[in-house]
Amino acid sequence: MKSWPVYVLAFWLCAVVVAAAFDLAPDAIRLEAILHGPGPAAWLGNDDLGRNILSRILAGAQVSMTVAVLVTVITLSFGVTVGLIAGYFGGWVDRLLMQVTDVFLAFPGILLAIAFAAVLGPGLNNLILALCLTSWVGYARLTRAQALSLRGRQHVQAAESLGAGTPRIMLRHMLPLLAAPLVVEATYSIAGLVIAEASLSFLGLGIQAPQASWGSMLRDGVRYMLVAPHYVLAVGLSLMSLVLAVNVLGDKLRDALDVRR
Amino acid sequence: MLKRLFGVVPVVFGVLLLTFLLVHLVPGDPVEVMLGESASSADRSQLRAELGLDKSLPLQFVNYLSRLAQGDFGNSIHSREPVSAMLAERLPATIRLALLALVIAIAIGLPLGIIAALRANRWPDRIATLTSLTFSAMPHFWLGPLLMMVFALWLGWLPVSGMESSASIVLPALTLGFGLSAILTRMTRASLLEVLNEDFVRTARAKGLQEHQVILGHALRAALLPVVTILGLQLGGLLAGTVITETVFGWDGIGRLLVESIEKRDYPVTQACVLVIALIYVLVNLCTDLLYTQLDPRVRYSR
């Protein structure tokens, strides 16, 4: 029982593989099964167009996790680069870059992503772009704070006096020591991005019909909540289980790697 | 303290610049996107002139700033109404909602966090931690419908949505409040646990004070200081959360205005909503920081 987040995550990863490997026909419309409850034909019931909710949840998981992992990889690389440059060089470079991150942090939560998605227009690519534009800031701040203290360490100074180039110092002598807090931060951010993708799709700014997304499914589910509560419950519980598992995994990683937030 | 005050100036400038640039991020011609393809070229050039889009970018920004300084947010493209009037109409509802949510969050999160810390690693702590973990994994667009389903549709105790009755505020405020209370519980627990190991708590116990005096009079005072700062930052999540929550419950605040304006491609309104929410957030954080320096004697005397 101790490692239940791992099992839940493994389940969702399998789900993504299954959804990718087999054609579960998430978009197949069956008008005779509109808003049918769970049964042997469809384990989680059917939605407002008679589509199989389970198939759509699996397809939605695929979208959700692809977006979360992709955005994390892109923003982690960018944020760490910015943070290393600011922390290592210091001076006006640092002040300028931190001023920029301050401006991004002045927009609370998902607001800036909503604003970017609103002007860029809906769709998967713009959704990813909007999330990338707003998610790199945390990594930059974290890396910069750590890099500032690492710069004065003896092994970094030794490498400098031996004539190592700046990229080599950053990548070989500083980055390995930054890895632990970054891994923890990235884990939490995956959970955050799953929620962010669903939020934007819920508002109609993300994934567009007929492609399945947990956010847009929740929006449709709310509409039919009175007659078909199984719809919104199935999607909501799926989202919650994934986010909860990733967050608990983050807590465990933080304790194991002894990172203070 | 003055340094902190002046530190806000470049941030506010950056926020203004970024919200100004938002409209220019629209792929293609913003005027065409707003008016649709069927609009006549006369209409287009009129709107372009009205928005000042025919001028150079730096000049547009200067005009934008000078109009904002006079409280002029432009006009809605959809209803032709001044945006400032729309904001003034919607903002009080959002502030009411956010304040009630804050009260709910403190009323739940603070006691839960204190109990969890005092009974660390025993069953009250386990329950409190599990509750807060669960709530933090429930985004507003899932918790909101769930509360709506149970309390409005099944039990029929509260109105489903809208703002006709005074009870309408309860469900959206609970939705926002529960999410924030989860964070507050974890922060209070961690902060109090740390303080309980400090020397001054041992001293308080050693001089024979009652346990509740030690906790309430000594430990809690010190433990709540970091909580206040982080609470200021978390209010941002609350403000951003109003966008979704107001949409779910049909609450006519600034968050719903933002979503409506996005659907209608009414960019001046979108721009103004984003700007106002961000400025409120910056102001709240500034106030929290100033309050913190007043509350903490260590910070106050070190200056």
Image (cartoon, coloured by chain):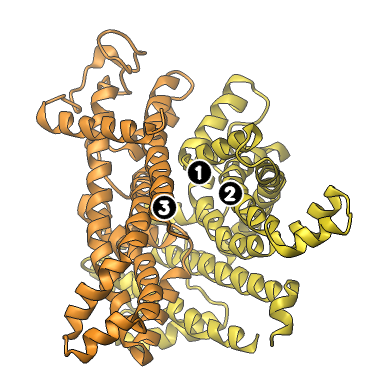
Chain colours: A orange, B yellow
Circle 2 chain: B
Q: Secondary structure at mark 1?
A: helix
* Residue at (41% x, 45% y) in the render: A252
Position of B75 with respect to A93 (left or right) is right
How far apart marks 3 and 1 lie (CA) works out to: 17 Å
Circle 3 chain: A
Label 1–label 2 contact, CB within 8 A: yes
| Pointer 3 residue | A254
| Pointer 1 residue | B136
Marks 1 and 2: same chain?
yes
Q: Secondary structure at mark 3?
A: helix
| Residue B204 lies in quadrant | bottom right
x, y percentage for residue B157?
Answer: 68, 25
Q: Nearer the viewer, mark 1 or mark 2?
A: 2
How far apart marks 2 and 3 lie (CA) works out to: 15 Å
Identity, as a three-letter code, of the amino acid under mark 2? Arg
Choose between B70 and A199: the one closer to the eye. A199
* Residue at (30% x, 48% y) in the render: A206
Marks 2 and 3: same chain?
no
Crowding at dot 3, Cα within 10 Å, few <14 / some 14-19 / many 20+, comes out as some
- Look at the image and tell me whether residue B54 can be seen: no
How far apart marks 1 and 2 lie (CA) works out to: 10 Å
Choose between B185 and B211: the one closer to the eye. B211
Identity, as a three-letter code, of the amino acid under mark 1? Ser
Identity, as a three-letter code, of the amino acid under mark 3? Arg
| Pointer 2 residue | B186
Residue B4 in the image: above or below residue A223:
below
The tag on residue B11 is none
Circle 1 chain: B
